[in-house]
Image (spheres, rainbow, N blue to C red):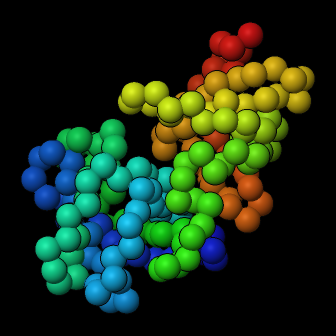
Amino acid sequence: MTYKNQILFGRIAKIHGYDGTVTVKIEQRFVEDIPEMESVFIETDGKPVPFFISMAEYSGGDFLKMKFRDYGSYDKISEFNGCKIFLTTTIGEKDQTDNIGNVVGFKVLLEDNQIIGTIIDIVQNPGQDLMKIISQANREILIPFHEDLVVHFDLRKKTIIVDLPEGLTDINQ
């Protein structure tokens, strides 16, 4: 399994309503101490995909209602029913993943391991964060930092592997 550095938080137990809210059955060790989270990784097809939390509501027991940014409908979120949710830090431990801006310095690669460049900044726009990347040719490239584009996120190696639409990196020339 590829989650050596991550901690299992729970599993999406069911879809709650039609607004994209899910009910997460949390692991027993988190029942009395739910960590504050801005993002989590959802395992899809055996790979971790980062999701940003827009709402989390705990009312007791071992279930938590969650909603993810950009997944505001039943149709969008239903494919993740039953998926595992992972944290990237232990309870009480401050980690670089607490802030999306701390991916600065990560290498961004295509799926064929071709290097796009190194992240120099995260540009936060309403509705879409962008990775500002400096290429090996010293050219700035902006790529959406979106879960549909991120294939693999490796904290240990400080790499992000992406699957980009053809020509996306050429737009910034």
Q: What residue appears at the point 20 percent right and 64 percent down from the top-left corner?
A: 57
**Which of the image's four quarters has the N terminus?**
bottom right
143 or 121, which lies in front? Answer: 121
Residue 7 visible from this viewpoint: yes
User: Where is residue 37, by image quadrant?
Assistant: bottom left
In the image: residue 146, left or right of residue 20 = right
Residue 110 visible, this orientation: no
Query: Of residues 43 and 104, which is closer to you in this image?
Result: 104
Residue 137 image position (x, y, % from top left): 89, 23
Measured along the vertical axis of the image, is residue 171 above or below residue 109? above
Question: Is the residue 10 above or below the residue 98 in the image?
Answer: below
**Measured from the top left, where is residue 67 in percent x and y?**
26, 53
Q: Position of residue 25 (x, y in %)?
A: 26, 76
| Snapshot quadrant of residue 3 | bottom right
Quarter of the image that includes the C terminus: top right
The number of numbered badges drawn on the structure is: 0
Figure check: 91 above or below 36: below
In the visual, does 165 lie left or right of 86?
right
Query: Is 162 situated above or below 29?
Result: above
Residue at image location 48% in from the left, 60% down from the top: 41
Q: Which residue is located at x 41 percent, y 50 percent?
A: 52
**Residue reaching furthest to the left:** 17
Indicate the position of residue 42 as horizontal and vertical percent values.
44, 60
Q: As drawn, which residue projects farthest toward the right?
A: 137
At 20% from the left and 71% from the top, the residue drawn is 58
